[in-house]
Image (tube, helix red, strand yellow):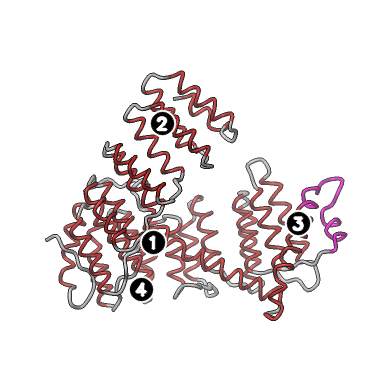
Amino acid sequence: MNSVTLLGPRIVHKISHCLIISRKLCDRAFHGDDGCECVEEPLKKIVSEYDSLEGERLHVDEDWGCDHGQFSLRRGFIENVKLDAKKVIEILRQDGPGLDARLGLDELNVRPSGILVREVLAGILKSINFENKTRCAKLAYKFFVWCNQQEDYRPTTNAYHLMMNIYAECLEFKALWRSVDEMSQKGFPATARTFNILIRTCGEAGLAKKLVERFIKSKTFNCRPFKHSYNAILHGLFVLNQYKLIEWVYQQMLLEGFSSDILTYNIVMFSKYRLGKMDQFQILLDEMDRNGFSPDFHTYNILLHVLGKGDKPLSALNLLSLMRETGIEPTVLHYTTLIDGLSRAGNMDACKYFFDEMIKNGGTPDVVAYTVMITGYVVAGELEKAQEMFHEMISREQVPNVFTYNSIIRGLCKARKYKEAYSMLKEMETKGCSPNFVVYNTLVSSLRNAGRTADANEVIKQMMEKGNYAHILSRFQRE
C-alpha cells in the first residue's frame, strides 16, 4: 500500500492509494505557514508572465506601427520616452494653486503614447504611500484626462489597468469602478487582468461573490490567455487565495456545461487541499482520467507536496518514476516541494535522500532547496547538519537569502549560541542581505527569553539606526 501511481489507463486502479494519504492529512490542522509556496507560485505566475509578454508586444506594435524594420531604433526611442516621462512626473509634482499641471504639460510639448503613459502611471503607482495616496490619485487622473484630450491619442487597456491599480492602492474605489465602466463604454473588453485587479480590491470589501457573478454573465470578458472565462476567474481567485469562492465558481461552471481542462483541475485540486477536503481528491483524479487528461508539471507538484506532508517517501519515489515514464522529468522545484513536505512531517532522512537524488539526476539545488533543508534540520534540532548544509550551499556558489539566514540564526538561538547568532546577523549585512523584521524578531525574542535584555536592546538600537523600522518599534516595546 505504499505505491501511488496516478492517472493513466494502465494504472488508474491504483488511485485508491491517494485516499489513504487523504484521510491522514484531513486530520491535520491547516494554517498559513504550511509550505505551499512551491506549489502555488508557479500556478499564480501564469497571468503575470502572459501580461508582461502581451504588454510588451502591444507597446512595440503601438509605438512603431508594427514596422519591425525600425526595431533597431527602439532602444533609443524608449530612452527618450523615459526622459519625457520624468519631465511629466516632475510637472505633475508641481501641480497646485500656483501651477496647473495641465498648462505645464501643454508647454512641455510631448506626444502621449502608450509607452509614455505606461511610464508615467507606473512611476506614480510606485510612489504611492499612506501620506500621499489622495494626491497621487488626483495627479494620475489629471494626467490621464489630459492624454485623452490630445489629438491622435487613444488609451489602451494597459493604461486603464494602471489607473485601476492606482485607484486600488489609493483606496479610491468609486473612481476605480468608473474606470471599469469607461473602459467598457469605449469598447475595451475586460480581461483576466481586469478581473484580478477588481477581485483583489472587492475581496477585501466583501463584494467578491457579486463581482464574480458579474463577470460570469459578462459577454465582453476577454479571457486570454485562458481557454474560457471560467478559468480566468478561477485563476484570479486562486491568486488571491479565495479557495471557497473557487469551489462555488467551479460548481457554476459545471452547471453551465463548460468542460474542465488541466488548469481547472489543478486549481480546484489545490483549493480542495487548502480547504482540508482531501477526501475529494480521488473524485477529481478519476474525473480527469475519464476526460482524457494526464497530470502536468503542476499536477505532479501538488501530488508530491501531498505525499511529502503525508510522510510517504516510497509513494513519492514511485510517483517520480511515473513522471519519467510519462515524459516529465522531475525538476528542482518538484524535489524541493517534496522535501519541504517531508521536512514538515519530520522525516529528515527522507529529505536528505531526495536531496541527494536530485543532484544525482542532474539537478542543481537552488537557494530555496538549500533553505528548505536548512530549515528542516533546524526544526529537528540538528544544528550541525544545518550548518553543514549552509556551508555546502556557499561552496556551490548559491547565495543565502534572508530566509536562509533567519533559519540559521533561529537554530543558533535554540542552541543558546547567541554570540554566533549575532555574528550571523552582521554577516548578512556585509553580504548585502538586509535583515528584515522577522530576522530581528527571531534574535530579539530569543535574547529576551534567555534573560539577555541588554543584548536584545542593543540589537533593537542597531535595527533603528538602519532606518525604515520606526513603525514597528512599538511592537518590540510591547513584548
**Quadrant assignment for the N terminus:** bottom left
Image quarter for residue 289?
bottom left
Q: Position of residue 309 (x, y in %)?
A: 25, 52
Does 367 sit above or below residue 254?
above
Residue type at tag 4: Ser
Image quarter for residue 180?
bottom right
Give how far apart the Cα atoms at labels 3 and 2 are: 52 Å
Residues at marks 4 and 2 touching, judged by CB atoms closer than 8 Å: no
Give how far apart the Cα atoms at labels 2 and 1 are: 43 Å
Mark 1 element type: helix
What secondary structure is the stretch in magenta mostly built from?
A: helix
Magenta span: 90-109
Task: Depth check: give the residue in front, 165 or 257.
Answer: 165
Can you identify the residue that label 2 sits on? 421
Residue type at tag 3: Lys
Label at residue 260: 4
Dot 4 or dot 2: first in sequence order is: 4
**Quadrant assignment for the C terminus:** top left
Residue type at tag 2: Ala
Q: Is residue 351 magenta?
A: no
Can you identify the residue that label 1 sits on? 246
Does 80 sit above or below residue 70?
above
Dot 3 or dot 4: first in sequence order is: 3
Viewer-nearest of discs 4 and 2: 2
Dot 3 or dot 2: first in sequence order is: 3
Residues at marks 2 and 1 touching, judged by CB atoms closer than 8 Å: no
Residues at marks 3 and 4 touching, judged by CB atoms closer than 8 Å: no
Give how far apart the Cα atoms at labels 4 and 2 are: 51 Å
Give how far apart the Cα atoms at labels 4 and 1 are: 13 Å
Q: Position of residue 33 (x, y in %)?
A: 36, 45
Mark 3 element type: helix
Q: Position of residue 336 (x, y in %)?
A: 33, 55
